[in-house]
Amino acid sequence: MWGVMRRPLLLGVALAWLALPPGSSVAAEPPSLTVFAAADLAFAFRELAPRFEKATGARVTLVFGSTGNFAYQIREGGPADVFFAADRSFVDALVAERVLLAETRTLYAQGRIVLVTAKAFGPKLTELRSLLDARVRRVAIANPAHAPYGRAAEQALQKTGIWEAVRPKLVYGENIRHTLQFVQTGAVDAGIVARSIADVPEVDWAPIDPALHVPLDQVAAVVRRSPRPELGLAFIQFVNGPEGRPIMKRYGFRLPGEL
Amino acid sequence: MDLFPVWLSLRVALTATALTLLIGIPVALLLARRRFPGRNVLEAAVVLPLVLPPTVLGYYLLLVIGGRGPVGQALAAVGLELAFTWGAAVLAACVGSIALLIKSAQAGFETVDHQLEQAARTLGRSEWSVFWSVTLPLAWRSVLAGAVLAFCRALGEFGITLMVAGNIPGRTQTLPLAIYDRVQGAQLGEANALALIAVSVVVVLLFGLSRLARLRY
């Protein structure tokens, strides 16, 4: 029986394997650029990348995720050409290790945080102090231990003098998008997230005074082992150029001095 | 909708399951049949991937196969790269799933009556032949169950893959990574469609296998 059954089974598996396209089907036909970008850039870059492709004829592969993970992967040879980090500490460390090209290090935004309220919660909260309201049962922020926006949220709550009072209500998101999801799904009533990702239908947002936290300098740089550093630098310049800036601003990524 | 993650995941999971069977069955047989020094250590090592958080496991694996790790450098010396390729996704799937196959197959092999194997040997069968004609036929349901578990685990592998293969669209973005990416990017429609595909694949597979399992030796 084993012999009878085994052969068609193995044959089927082998055929299925062969019928599947190879894992690395995307060969580098036109010059292609892989961008590792912090999760909060997802919306802005999805709009921006096609324009860069049109302008240069290059293909852009966008990979979004946690800045800390990316820093680790790039150090271990991750196939990024450009790294857009959510803060500057990771980039500066990699520049010091000569993994990133120091001369390409560019400030592309100063992050802003906003107070978001789940629409399911009801009244839109407009100031941090309203988090003390007993009707607000749970508040989401990104984990201050490793997420830059979480640190900024913590500082803003401390400066407002309500950190200790709000603390029992806090829920930590793994990253800023995860934090927004807590609010989007209505799992928590309110939260503090990046301005850049707050334009979703399920939540309302109100600005938080940037003087309440240290500036969230967001820095990009080209990876040293990239085979096309000039294309990577071109992408950074495009983001900061006349076509990129308006889009970045629209998603809340402002440079110092930008209105 | 881009179906690349579906094909990639099927290929990764099939390849990983094949490798898992190849490596896992001898290990299961060893654990079931032999008493040797370090056996307990091996048994613990086998289940270790189930205990460690996948992302942490991924960190360690990347240390080994990454550009600066021993394996990564040895491979680079012969012009190969494993980290951040679909091969890394296969490795991740194997590491995450092999314990399920080994433990299940081991349990199966342990219930096989030694006297039947002895009888085959007295009739002049080689060890190889005893395995194929006596041991495996008597334990095949356990092996099959283990293989199904391993395949499903390989198909759903997320944390290790994210670290060692990256989440690169069109190259190493497997089905679970793609679903996660769509959820993160607020593209819930696509996320749901991909999740439905993942579930369908497993349902079809389990249905097919349950029919297969009704066959007898």
Image (spheres, rainbow, N blue to C red):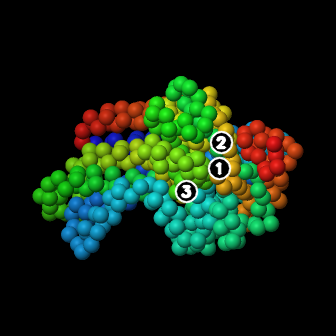
Question: Quick check: A125 left or right of B118?
Answer: right
Q: Nearer the viewer, mark 1 or mark 3?
A: 1
Q: Position of residue A161 (x, y in %)?
A: 55, 48
What crowding class fits label 2: few (fewer than 14 Cα within 10 Å), some (14-19), or many (20 or more)?
some
Q: What label sits on residue B135 in the rendered view? A: none
**The N terminus of chain B: image quadrant:** top right
Instruction: Residue under label 1, please give it.
Output: A212
Q: Which residue matches tag 2?
A: A208
Mark 2: which secondary structure? loop
Secondary structure beneath label 1? helix
The quarter in which the C terminus of chain B is drawn is: top left
Q: Please tell me which residue is depicted at 39% across the width and 58% down the height of the picture.
A: B52
Q: Residue at x 60, y 68 (%)?
A: B67
Give the CA separation, mark 3 to mark 2.
21 Å
Q: Can you tell which of label 3 and label 2 is closer to the viewer?
A: 2
- Element marked by disc 3: loop
Q: Which residue is painted at 28% across and 63% down in the image?
A: B43
Q: Is residue A256 left or right of residue B18?
A: right
Badge 1: how crowded within 10 Å, few (<14), some, or many (20+)? some
Q: Earlier in the sequence, mark 1 or mark 3?
A: 3
Instruction: Tell me whether the residue at label 2 lies in contact with that at label 1, contact meaning CB atoms closer than 8 angstroms.
Output: yes
> Residue B127, percent across and down?
25, 63
| Residue A92 visible in the displayed image | yes
